[in-house]
Amino acid sequence: MLSKLIDETKDAIVSAIKGVDDIFSALRGAVKNQVVGALKDASNVSATGLDAVTDVVTGSLKSAGEVGSSVAEVAKNSVQAAIEGVSEVGGDIIAATQKAASGSIAGAAELGEDLGSTAVGAIEGAIKAAESTGVDSTKAVGAAVTGVVQAADEVGSEAGSAVRKALLSAASLPKDIIKKAIDDDSKK
């Protein structure tokens, strides 16, 4: 079932971007539609239902080669759209943020892509989603950092280290919030 959702998402994105000028707008629309559809199909929007968010974002990353963009840009736009989709159906936005960020790392890892730049893109997407949904950006960033770091650690200690380093050195991210989230995660 889960791999089916990943494949469906990849196919939906590839179909959505064919022949359009603004591929990222089309990508965000396809990801959001997949999340909304998956959560409406779930009996509830609980943590179990939110696992669909991880799968949708993973599937979107698998479309990166056909989208013709960097995995980091696809991660940024996919994470943003997935969170906005969860917001639309009244789900837990902070939990969804962690799941979406985790899915971006899972997808990039499967493709053998740079996890550091993907993590930075995912956090940037979470920040944009926090702004558009009105959630506390500090909480959203913290959840996204937890998602990318834990997913990278599952890939391996070298991957986890690379993600932490990329997050701490990214000029586009709020260093104080990133550092605190990484420190809090390491205490778990």
Image (spheres, rainbow, N blue to C red):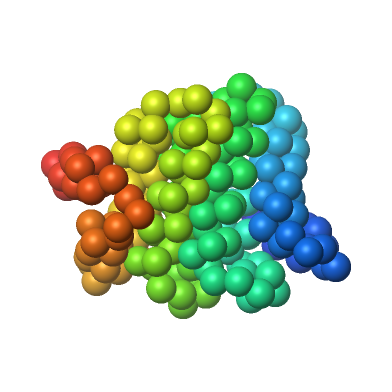
Q: Quadrant of residue 155?
A: bottom left
Q: Quadrant of residue 34?
A: top right
Identified at 23% across, 57% down, the residue is: 168
Q: Position of residue 171 (x, y in %)?
A: 30, 58
Identified at 61% across, 22% down, the residue is: 90
Q: Is residue 36 left or right of residue 81?
A: right
Whether residue 99 is visible here, answered yes or no, is no
The vertical placement of 171 against 34, above or below, is below
Q: Position of residue 27 (x, y in %)?
A: 69, 56
Observer-nearest of 172 and 168: 172
Whether residue 68 is visible here, answered yes or no, is yes
Observer-nearest of 176 and 7: 176
Q: Is residue 150 left or right of residue 131?
A: left
Q: Position of residue 124 (x, y in %)?
A: 44, 50
The vertical placement of 170 against 182, above or below, is below
Q: Position of residue 175 (x, y in %)?
A: 23, 48
Identified at 73% across, 30% down, the residue is: 40
The tally of labels here is 0
Where is the C terminus found, in terms of image quarters? top left
The vertical placement of 85 against 105, above or below, is above
Q: Residue furthest right?
A: 19
Identified at 70% across, 36% down, the residue is: 36
Q: Is residue 34 left or right of residue 81?
A: right
Q: Is residue 181 left or right of residue 68?
A: left
Q: Quadrant of residue 60?
A: bottom right
